[in-house]
Amino acid sequence: MSHADDHLAPDVTPFFDAETNTISYVVKDPGSSACAIVDSVLDLDYAAGRIATRSADAIIAHVREHGLTVEWLIETHVHADHLSAAPYLQRALGGKIGIGERITVVQHTFGKVFNEGTEWRRDGREFDHLFTDGEAYHVGTMPCVALHTPGHTPACMTHVMGEAAFVGDTLFMPDGGTARADFPGGDAATLYRSIQRVLALPPATRLFMCHDYGPNGREIRWETTVAAERAENIHLRDGVTEAAFVAMREARDATLGMPRLIIPSLQVNMHAGQLPPPGADGKRFLKVPLDVL
């Protein structure tokens, strides 16, 4: 793989959103003022239909306080549990919005679910950049590489930046296990193979989670290592076979309900975080497909 430099340690600042248990990151090149923002959150009070920007504003304040230059606004995948704040952050800070090139598969799948119509071109054009598997890029002077790690969704990517990797929903902390694989386009066997790619990174690689739910009442955590996951992950430590993992994952997924914000999240995030266009009266509306998900 590696076009990334596994001896180069980026400065990683986490931002935890308690409403969605999401961790966003500002990842700074240690050799310059350049940074990337990974998996940002736009606040949504779903019951009231109100959008707010508290989470994103905290990131903006941090970037400005430290004089950083935003080069990338990266989505590890199309999130089903929160809205992306990437367009809002881009207007304030600049940078290119990027996601994996398989976003087109997700757009085709959920374009049908949300009855988007034939006029919408499902080609990822709302995003500034579509990452390919193994693609090398830079944040400032820091070499990075994007790895296609599907299974949770078809478009999931792990971004390796120096000796840190941002795994999206592919993995959780060792005591949290792994992501569900039962959304449309998801697949437990594919997830198993993707996780093996992540766990093949150098053992000291720092892994940063997109979510943590504090299993068994412990404090929220979001950073671990490849070595710790291989030794301790409750679903997929070393020695767990693909067949055993698939059986566990599929049985567990069958017991899970849909995420609380899946309906607004998917229809906004597949459009690169753009909210639905306003009607003639200036009001915006989200759709609720019945008996589909």
Image (spheres, rainbow, N blue to C red):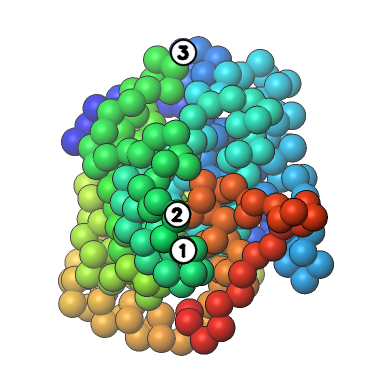
Q: Badge 2: how crowded within 10 Å, few (<14), some, or many (20+)?
A: few
Q: Quadrant of residue 58?
A: top right
User: Gap in Å between the C-alphas at discs 3 and 2?
Assistant: 41 Å
Depth check: give the residue in front, 6 or 151. 151
Does residue 119 sit above or below 29 in this rendering? below
Tag of residue 120: 2
Q: Amino acid at mark 2?
A: Trp
Q: Are marks 2 and 1 in contact (CB under 8 Å)?
A: yes
User: Gap in Å between the C-alphas at discs 1 and 3?
Assistant: 46 Å
- Label 3's element? loop
Question: Which numbered disc, 1 or 3, marks the residue closer to the eye?
Answer: 1
Question: Which residue is at 66% across, 38% downward?
Answer: 88
**Residue 236: image location, x then y, percent:** 30, 66
Tag of residue 31: 3
User: Gap in Å between the C-alphas at discs 2 and 1?
Assistant: 6 Å
Depth check: give the residue in front, 70 or 211. 70
Q: Earlier in the sequence, mark 3 or mark 2?
A: 3
Depth check: give the residue in front, 82 or 229. 82
Tag of residue 27: none
Question: Which residue is at 77% across, 64% downward?
Answer: 49
Q: Badge 1: how crowded within 10 Å, few (<14), some, or many (20+)?
A: few
Q: Amino acid at mark 3?
A: Gly
Q: Badge 3: how crowded within 10 Å, few (<14), some, or many (20+)?
A: some
Residue on which disc 1 sits: 117
